[in-house]
Structures are given as structure tokens and as C-alpha cells.
Amino acid sequence: MNPRHQVQLLRQIQELEFATLELNLFLDVQPQDQQALAMYNKLQSELMQCVRTYEQAYGPLLNFGFSPNMHDYWKWVDSPWPWEIKY
């Protein structure tokens, strides 16, 4: 494990989550804006790739839902958890 890489990936995920959420809110009031929709789709794809990369290297970000158990044990209990990492 590379702690510096882990922090970089977490920050990238946070940035992409923020941007996609903001675009989501914008599209709620401007649903016909094709440029915003294209940007949302691009950033959402990048976000999902970053999450997959992070989870393959460092374990799940969530204990339910989008983080399937791809190992032969319950990896969620491994430390540190994403919110325990010191930035």
C-alpha cells in the first residue's frame, strides 16, 4: 500500500463527487443543457473509475451498496477506514 497514492485517490474522488453533485443540481433546473449533461456523464465515468481503482487497491469505500465483496473475507473491517486517514 502506498499512503500518498491512497490520499491522492481519495481527494480525486472527493473532487469528482463534488463536481458531479453540483452538475446534478444544475441539471435539475436546466435539464435540456446538453453541455452540462455531457460534462456530468464524463465526470461520473471518471468518478466510477477512480472508485474502482481505489477499492481494488485499498478496499471498499462503503460498507454497503456499491462496494461488492471481491475477496474471500469481509474486508470492510480492515483499517484504516477512509475517514480515519490523516490528510
Image (spheres, rainbow, N blue to C red):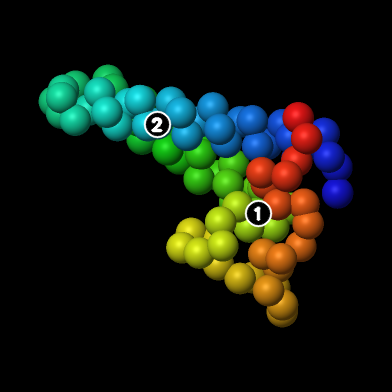
Which comes before the other along the chain, label 2 or label 1?
2
Which residue is more in the foreground, 3 or 31?
Answer: 3
- Give me the C-alpha separation between circle 2 and circle 1: 20 Å
Viewport quadrant of the C terminus: top right
As drawn, the label of residue 39 is none
Which residue reaches farthest bottom?
72
Instruction: State the residue position of label 2.
Output: 20
Question: In the displayed structure, does residue 4 sit left or right of residue 66?
Answer: right
Question: In the displayed structure, does residue 33 sit left or right of residue 1?
Answer: left
Question: In the displayed structure, does residue 25 sit left or right of residue 8?
Answer: left
The answer, for residue 38, to whether it is visible in the render is no
Q: On the image, which quarter does residue 40 sit in?
A: top left
* Residue drawn at 50 percent across, 64 percent down: 64
Q: Amino acid at mark 1?
A: Glu
* Residue drawn at 35 percent across, 25 percent down: 22
Q: Amino acid at mark 2?
A: Thr
The answer, for residue 75, to whether it is visible in the render is yes
Q: Percent x, y for residue 29?
A: 15, 24
